[in-house]
Image: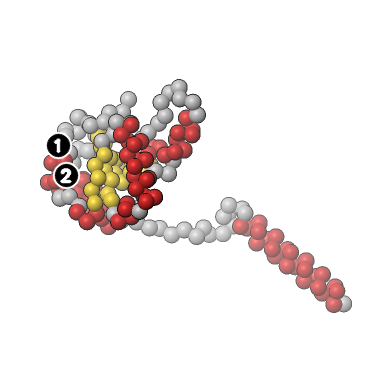
Amino acid sequence: MIYFLLILLAVLLLAAFAIKTSKESDGGKGENWPLVVKRPLSQPEQVLYYRLIEALPGFVILPQVSLSRFLDVKKGVKNPMSWLNRVNRMSVDYLVCSPAMQIVAVIELDDASHKRPNRIKADETKKRVLTTAGIHIIRWHVQSLPKVSAIEARLQLAPEMPLASVN
């Protein structure tokens, strides 16, 4: 009798384990995903965003844009996906565009994390990528966010005169 109960217990444990494993591997179909909403921009990023909007009327300000949304590999290059994979997870804080969606500049907002060795290396790589593509980069620090007048002075452009053009 005790062997029968042990075998029954083992079968029940295996069945429970199989059910749990199948729920975990179903891509989350059978359960709620453990995700919560967060603000897409930090407090300093929000402040700068609204200052950019005020300082650059007529321009389109796009926050948190992945490089793969506005960069592509030149035609004829071998293994284009390997080049795109290099920038796959990179993004810019703000992409400034003309009304015709031509890229004018990229604005990066730095905080203390940009002093870490891995961030320094990532920033250097991003700078090389953007410079190679002919995109103007402006960097500001969160501790010294520019006023609207300073933004206007730094980007003295008409919307139809972008610093970088897209083919």
Residue type, label 2 = Ile
- Colour mode? secondary structure
Residues at marks 1 and 2, CA–CA distance in whole angstroms: 8 Å
Q: Along the polypeptide, which appears first: circle 1 or circle 2? A: 2
Instruction: Return the residue at label 2.
Output: 151
Judged from this view, the residue extending furthest toward the front is: 117
Residue located 17% across and 50% down the image: 146
Q: Position of residue 11 (x, y in %)?
A: 78, 66
141 up-or-down from 84: above or below: below
* Residue at 51%, 58% in the rendered image: 33
In the displayed structure, does residue 84 sit left or right of residue 124? Answer: right
Front in this rendered view, residue 92 or 86: 86
Residue 101 visible in this rendered orientation of the protein: no
Q: Does 57 appear above or below 38? A: above
- Amino acid carrying mark 1 in the image: Gln
Q: Total label count?
A: 2
Of the pair 29 and 25, the residue shown nearer to us: 25
Q: Quick one: quadrant of the N terminus?
A: bottom right
Q: Which residue is mark 1?
A: 156
Quarter of the image that includes the C terminus: top left
Tell me if residue 28 can be seen. yes
Q: Secondary structure at mark 2?
A: helix
- Quadrant of residue 154 in the image? top left
Q: Badge 2: how crowded within 10 Å, few (<14), some, or many (20+)?
A: some
Q: Position of residue 49 (x, y in %)?
A: 24, 49
Identify the residue at horizontal 12%, vertical 46% (top origin): 149
Kindly state the secondary structure of the residue where label 1 is placed.
loop
Q: Is residue 125 left or right of residue 158?
A: right
Q: Residues within 10 Å of mark 1 (few under 14, many from 20)?
A: few
Q: Position of residue 5 (x, y in %)?
A: 82, 74
User: Which of the two residues, 62 or 32, is positioned nearer the viewer here?
Assistant: 62
